[in-house]
Image: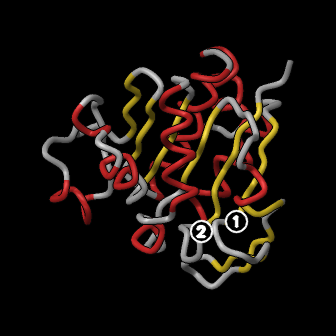
Amino acid sequence: MKKEVLLLLHPDFEEIEAITPIDLLRRAGVIVHTASTSNELEVQSKGGILIKADSLLSEHEHSLYDALVIPGGPGIFQIRNHSMVQKKIQEFHSSKKCIACICAAPLLLLDQGLSEAFTMTCHPSVQREFPSLHSEATVCDQHIITSKGAGTAVSFALAIIEYLLDKDTAQTIADAICM
């Protein structure tokens, strides 16, 4: 059975942090569902690019996935109190399913109290909010994957592939993109 991922698109998301995981996960055979956190399917990125999500997050209240992926960008600050986003994080965590956050998105994990139990990393612009962080570009701690930012989007996506599938598949994808 193929693995399935829910990737959230929020207004002002960082393009590379969303598109890179979508692309590499799909190359690995993972089914990626994109969901807008707003009431519109079209979501404008930080750089002004309009991306059409597959669906609205509100349509995924009872959906089951193998991983939740959240790109960063300045829009993270607007969704920190988004009840459906909080609910999804709690749901995935309680099921010990993969939650992958990059850039400022680990703030959503901090808000749920998860930074105390898991080693994480994040973008330097938000690190002051965390009591402690790991210095690596991408950190995997059990079912939690975090990464620093746009420049680490490939290693972030490969870590998700390795978690969901296996190291060989992640290496095959890395080789295919000349990583």
Q: State the residue at coordinates (21%, 56%).
A: 127
Q: Amino acid at mark 2?
A: His
User: How many residues crowd around disc 2 within 10 Å: few (fewer than 14), some, or many (20 or more)?
Assistant: many
Contact (Cβ within 8 Å) of mark 1 with mark 2: yes
Taking 43 as reference, is 129 left or right?
left
- Above or below, 35 relative to 63: below
Quadrant location of the C terminus in the rendered image:
top right
Please tell me in which quadrant of the rendered image residue 62 appears: top right
User: Where residue 91 sits in the image (x, y, percent)?
Assistant: 55, 36
Q: Quadrant of residue 104?
A: bottom left
Q: Position of residue 11 (x, y in %)?
A: 59, 76
The residue under label 2 is 10
Q: Secondary structure at mark 2?
A: loop
Going from N to C along the chain, the mark reached first, 1 or 2, is 2
Q: Secondary structure at mark 1?
A: strand
60 above or below 171? below
149 vs 84, nearest the viewer: 84
Can you identify the residue that label 1 sits on?
36
Q: Residue 47, how many percent across, how many down?
A: 57, 81
